[in-house]
Amino acid sequence: MRMLTHGMAVAGCLIVLSTGCGRKAPRIESNADILPDLPGAKIAVEAGQSVVFHNQHITLGEIRDDGDYAYTVGVKDSGTMMRETASPGDWRLHKDLLLRLSKKNDRGDDTLLSLYWLPKLEQASGRIDPSTLMELKEGEHRFFDGGFVSLDRVRANDPGDTDDERAEVTLLMNDVLYNVAVLELGSIPAGDMVVVAENVYDGDRPGEGLARIRIARPSTAWSEATGAKEIEIESGGALEERSLLVRTDTLEDRAGGWRALVSLSSSGNRRDAILREGESLRAGTHELHLTEITEKGLRGRMMTYAASVSPEDAFVPGIPREKPEDGEATSAGESEATKTTRRVGFSQSFDFQGARFTLATLYPNDPTSLGDDAAEFQVAHSGTIDRFVTKQGQRHTVHGDNRWWIIELKELSGGRNGQAEVTVETGRFVGFPAKKSERW
């Protein structure tokens, strides 16, 4: 989660912003466009064009088309110039002025500058209650008392997956901007509030995504749950109760701290995700809310609901889901194969869900003990090879680009004709491992 405060250097277009608060009004250039002092305004601008809005002088400077349509932004206040860079659709907050730059159309012929004067917005009507479910299309936003919420983008990792969409949301509360990516049928904290997502749909084409979300207080975010209890699971461990199965592993974050790889199965529904502290994930009749993640494991709350839901149920009504083209995604047969048990001999290999598993070395230790033999496995995936030494009964997790594998050595016999029996369980990441992305 990113938190942007006034003046923090982050990514946008060259903007020079001068304020006249407590001083003489800024000198207005003769070619500047003077906009009415309304709560909001939009104008198509070009590089070098100036705009005046509520005595704020904004100048759009350099626009760099470097593949990401990045802009350079300069903010001038009290004679000090601050420069930033950003991509289209990013919001910027400067005291009482909220602004956003975006492409006017798909061709990118013009840059659209959207401006909002917060004191005027507080007096305007038509604001929404953010605690009620709202449907937003990509690029849309809503204002409410004390802030606004915007659906910037919907992203999906695997085009064949039905449950890995996340809604990228910008939220303004108490003069602070928060940028979060909330998982479908999940939640994520933003300041003192929680962003809860129900339907999230990435659309058939870029820019057609939409999401149904609400902004709730922690005390009401899970009010529909019929029960809740505290749970604790060791890293690499599992929790199993009737129709509920939770498997976990912890991942070290490059930025510090820990994340959790969670596989949650409930009432015939299974979700696999990487979550941070404070996030939640729902499958079937259960929802796991993580409150603490360490190297040793995780703590959280397990909520129970009367009705079962799945990502398929969460599709937006009336919008047909297009099936991916051949080769775009994992086939249905492979998708259903989440677990396998194989017996391999020395130097033998087998393939499963995008990885090759090889019994590379056998280490027979004490000849009088049948339980202390060890084996080295090599797992080739995503252009890399992971190696680990394991003993009977031990489990190891291998993380791929967008998939994980848990390998458990069930049985091992050493000697010249030694063999190993292993069980491999797999799942897809919802989100990216740290080596692929540091956004969340």
Image (tube, helix red, strand yellow):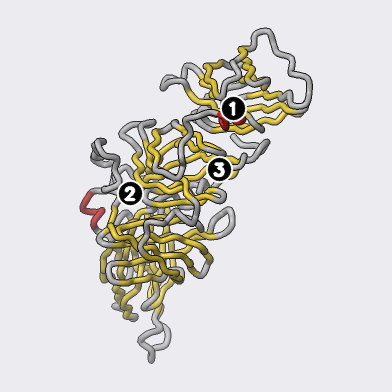
User: Which of the pair 395/365 is nearer the observer?
Assistant: 395
Q: From mark 3 to mark 2, how far is it between C-alphas?
A: 24 Å
Q: Earlier in the sequence, mark 2 or mark 1?
A: 1
Report the residue marked by disc 1: 120
Can residue 431 be seen? yes
Q: Amino acid at mark 3?
A: Tyr
Q: x%, y% of residue 68?
A: 50, 30
Q: Nearer the viewer, residue 291 or 363?
A: 291
Residue occupied by mark 3: 178
User: Residue 303, percent across and down?
Assistant: 39, 63
SS at badge 3: strand
Left or right, 387 with reference to 84: left
Q: Earlier in the sequence, mark 3 or mark 2?
A: 2
Instruction: Please report contact status of discs 3 and 2: CB closer than 8 Å, yes or no.
Output: no
Q: Which label number is shown at residue 163? A: 2
Whether the residues at callouts 3 and 1 have beta carbons within 8 Å, the answer is: no
The disc labelled 1 sits on which kind of residue?
Answer: Lys
